[in-house]
Amino acid sequence: MVALPKQVYEISGDTLQVGLVLALEGAGLFAGLLLGGVLADRYDRKKLIVLARSICGLGYATLTVNALFAQASLSVIYTFSLWNGFFGALGISALLASMPHIVGREKLLEARAISMLSMRLIGIAAPALAGLIISLGSVAWAYGLTTLGTIITVISLLHLPSMRPSRQVDHVQPITALFDALKYICNQPLIRSLVIMGALISASTAIRIFFPELVAQYFSNQAWVLGLFYAAVPAGAACGAFLSGWAQNIKRPGKTMTWVSIAVFTCVVAFGLTFSLTTAYLWPTLLCLFVFGYLNTIASLLQYTLLQAHTPDHYLGRVNGLWTALDAGGDSLAMSGAAILAKIAGTTLSIVSIGTIALAISATIMSLSSPLRRACFEPALEAKN
């Protein structure tokens, strides 16, 4: 998260290059999610998760070796950003679809909250630690520790139970199976609205591509400040996951999710405006990022729970794959668009534009989608079966 954009920016000195390498990773993520969703509805989801993470670890190891050279290769970084995006995503659909098997649909919100909390707590420490490691050593150390962490993760995943889908789609061609799931999403107003809202929330996180440039311009390019920028969002997210118990008592979680999403996009606008003055102050910007992370987690938690609860098991892999792929696609398009817009109109306007556009679209969806406003956590009959 920290080493990749910092290394690219140090080599090229160009935020557009940072946006492009992250967009390439997002393209691999998009393709991997689509294929992974089909595979997750065909094969044992545990095997798919373990295989995908193992191959992804090889990519991290290659980035480590590349960073050890005096002149690191941008071509290698581009190649293995795509590699890690694709293989990392291959198991994500299966990972998401495995949760109902492990805890049951009635425990989805609590289980997701625990999962998000554990990830966010690591997310608080890891970026700040990465900034410190890079300051004291190099990006090679950050990549190397990521490789080691992946090995540990694969070992822990071996303890998962076997998880085959309830109704396999072996007889259906992959493209046909994928379009069948896409048709299902389009024909279900609630699922369709949830997927679009998720893509908007994901797109709002594209503001992270500006972190290296903002730190370089306003905070003397200090690596520890960059680490704090990347740590502030997961810090707020961890707080959101830890304090999310109230969410399970919401009578209309769909409506609440939309209002929280609108607040997320408002935070993006506020973050951009903190850099509209000649001098930027560290703590107000970190506060905006912290609140952004908190609200983002609440919105994502409600979205995930509703999506899993109202999707039949034999569609879970593909629907999760398509949903997450659209999130990744929205993120990649937003990063590319934001980087291009920043070249034309400046960084601040680009950040404010992302928040404003997402704010307008989410408000429109809320006003037009009555199934989303009425949605509750109780799974639909077809989802239970």
Image (tube, rainbow, N blue to C red):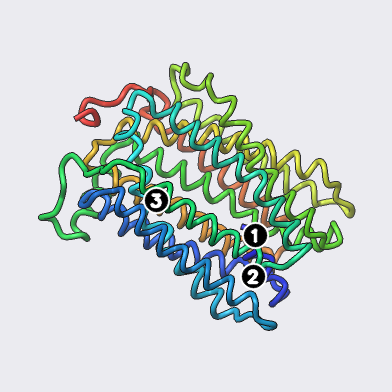
Q: Which residue is mark 1?
A: 209
Amino acid type, label 2 = Leu
Q: Residue at x 74, y 66 (%)?
A: 137
Residue 342's spot in the image, x, y percent? 68, 64
Q: Residue furthest right?
A: 279
Tag on residue 310? none
Residue 258 in the image: above or below residue 51: above
Amino acid type, label 3 = Ile
Residue 265's spot in the image, x, y percent? 61, 41
Amino acid type, label 1 = Ile
First in residue order: circle 3 vs circle 1: 3
Considering depth in this image, is 134 or 376 the residue closer to the camera?
A: 134
The residues tagged by marks 2 and 1 sit, at their Cα atoms, a distance apart of 9 Å
Q: Which residue is mark 2?
A: 16
Query: For numbered disc 3, what is the local secondary structure?
Result: helix
Considering depth in this image, is 250 or 367 the residue closer to the camera?
A: 250
User: How packed is label 2: few (under 14 Cα within 10 Å), some, or many (20 or more)?
Assistant: many
Q: Is residue 7 left or right of residue 177?
A: right
The answer to whether residue 5 of the structure is visible from this angle is yes
The residues tagged by marks 3 and 1 sit, at their Cα atoms, a distance apart of 23 Å
Q: Residue at x 79, y 58 (%)?
A: 215
Quarter assignment of residue 35: bottom left
Query: For numbered disc 1, what is the local secondary structure?
Result: helix
Considering depth in this image, is 54 or 336 the residue closer to the camera?
A: 54
First in residue order: circle 2 vs circle 1: 2
The answer to whether residue 263 of the structure is visible from this angle is no
Q: Residue at x 44, y 17 (%)?
A: 251
